[in-house]
Image (spheres, helix red, strand yellow):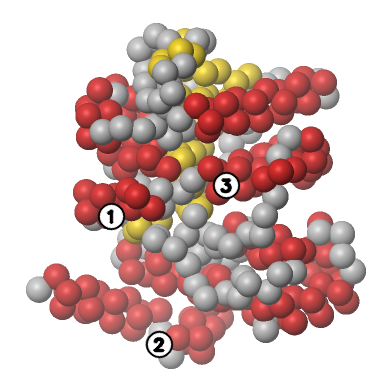
Amino acid sequence: MTNKTPTVSHVTLVACNGVLGTSLGITTDLYALLSNLMKFNGKDFTIELVSVNGEPILTQGDLTVQIHKGIDDIEETQLVMIPPFWGDIEATLKQQNNFIHWLQKQYKNGAILVAHATAVFFLAEAGLLNGKRSTTHWMYINKLEKNYPKINVCRQQHITAEDNIYCSAGLSSAMDLGLHLIEHLWGKKLAKILEDNFVADFRRGYESPLIDFDGEKHHGDKIVLKIQQWMELNFTKSTDLETLSKRFEISLRSLKRRFKIATGETPLGYQQRLRIEKAKILLKADALAISQVSHAVGYEDISYFGSLFKRTTGLTPNQFRKTAHSKNSTYLA
């Protein structure tokens, strides 16, 4: 499986019985509008609503929803979205066993996977979240952590993103994530049109960082909040401040001044902290060499990464890894 973002022209929305109609409706309507815009611009785009067995589904509110086909009819897709369901999680997982294998296959083929709230349990059961950060609805977060100890459950985050797998905790965060993905995959212009024409009522101050650290988020500067959100999703990119200022339609001088006033630090300092926090997560997982961790968080110069990490944490990357493992061993004992 590659982490490279695929070209997305085919989207599959997979729903099961008990699906929350609100989430399903918002997603289908949002992507229907996206489909119209794409086709208007002469681009191929297909979104299909499917169920595991190809039969119509019944929402939690007892509405029957007609679907296009079953998962076995979808040989390959670039983006899979799973809306949340309500009910007995264990029973639902057992009933959808074929779906688990299908998800594993699609992810192996390079598809992006997106799960909202309880739907995160499908990814967990498939083993696709092992060693990765994830979140879910607050009512189920204890169950997720208990049943799947290999997952790095992020209790304070409403959205997580790692290795082409995205999870959200609820409806509002699902909308935030949906708009980010549309911008990421199809461009800022389309995302802006959708936001202005479809989700204006959902706009809110963004308070759910994708990387769990104590970055200031309660300053009330909406532009800076948007910049923080973008940086937290794209922290590995080498983006200069001039490009960032153009992206958010703010002067370079204002960007520096407002970011410093709002967060207490410079944009570069903020990006460095994001990278170090991600490096900590990777070092604790112990799956990558130090050089691989350095590259994964955006630093080609390994020695510079090492010196920056030590200056920030007081430990070298290797010392941090050993200390983290020692603490884990003590806790498990």
Circle 2 — which element?
Answer: loop
Residue tagged 2: 315
Is 141 or 246 nearer to us in this picture? 141
| Rendering quarter of residue 10 | top right
Q: Mark 3 or 1 closer to N-term?
A: 1
Mark linked to residue 172? 3
**Where does residue 65 sit, x and y in percent of width and height?**
49, 14
- Can residue 169 be seen in the rendering of this structure? yes
Q: Mark 1 or 2 closer to N-term?
A: 1
Work out which quarter of the rendered image holds the C terminus and state it: bottom left
Tell me, yes or no, whether the two marked residues, 3 and 1, touch with CB atoms within 8 Å: no
Circle 3 — which element?
Answer: helix
Residue tagged 1: 142
Q: Is residue 321 above or below residue 61?
A: below
Mark linked to residue 5? none
Badge 1 density bin: few <14, some 14–19, many ≥20, Cα 10 Å: some
Badge 3 density bin: few <14, some 14–19, many ≥20, Cα 10 Å: some
Work out which quarter of the rendered image holds the N terminus and state it: top left
Residue type at numbered disc 1: Asn
- Can residue 236 be seen in the rendering of this structure? no
Residue type at numbered disc 3: Ser
Residue type at numbered disc 2: Leu
Depth check, mark 1 against mark 2: the one in front is 1
Estimate the spatial distance between the alpha carbons at disc 1 and disc 2, rounded to whole Å: 32 Å
Circle 1 — which element?
Answer: helix
Estimate the spatial distance between the alpha carbons at disc 3 and disc 2, rounded to whole Å: 38 Å
Q: Mark 3 or 2 closer to N-term?
A: 3
Is 301 or 60 nearer to us in this picture? 60
